[in-house]
Amino acid sequence: LARSYEVMTSVEDQAKAAEIYREIGDQHPLSAYFLAHEAAEIGQTEEAERLMRVSASFGYPLAQTDLGKILFSSERGNEALPLFRDAEAVGDTEAAFVLGELNAQAGRFMDSLKHLRKAWGYGHAGAVELAIQVAQHMLATGDGKRSLVKRELREAQDCLKKLTRRVEAHPLQEKGKA
């Protein structure tokens, strides 16, 4: 029920969703996730992490990814990586993107492309842009099997064109305007 209110645009519906989530507390992954973000917004980082852990413990992939980001930013990367992997395994594109970024930063470019493909295959614009950069770097430096890298580059560029056309065909409307 709270999720139904949450996706509505009115302030009243948003408030009703928040009220339901607060009533449920950390007994459900979506309410714990919502409350974790609410705590983070007001600077309660320890409570945000606690609630994100609760939500992630239910196996909620968005919480796993967000908890991984919290841990990674506080230099607890060893604890974060399994969360990213678990979330990616069930299809979380943001987790795949993060793993792609981390592999690219570590110079593991083919691994990076593998993760980025999982993300851009579902329309993650940041992943397709990074995949293009990684592939171009690999071609320039001679890293990896050239034919595979060229194919990845071509497919990523095609995906970016499709995403661009989709955005141009369906620009976001400002609220209140037709």
Image: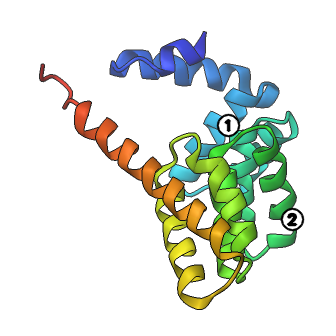
Q: Left or right: where does residue 57 sit relative to residue 96?
A: right
Estimate the x, y position of residue 140 in percent, counting from the top left. 53, 87
What label does residue 134 carry, if any? Answer: none
Residue located 63% across and 58% down the image: 116
Where's the N terminus, which quadrant?
Answer: top right
The residue singled out by tag 1 in the image is 33
Estimate the x, y position of residue 111 in percent, counting from the top left. 75, 68
Query: In what element is the residue under mark 1?
Result: helix
Residue located 84% across and 36% down the image: 59
What label does residue 79 carry, if any? Answer: 2
Q: Is residue 85 above or below residue 37?
A: below
Residue located 36% across and 49% down the image: 161
Q: Is residue 15 above or below residue 129?
A: above
Foreground residue, 39 or 74? 74
Foreground residue, 77 or 125? 125
Foreground residue, 73 or 168? 168
Label 2 vs label 1: CA separation?
19 Å
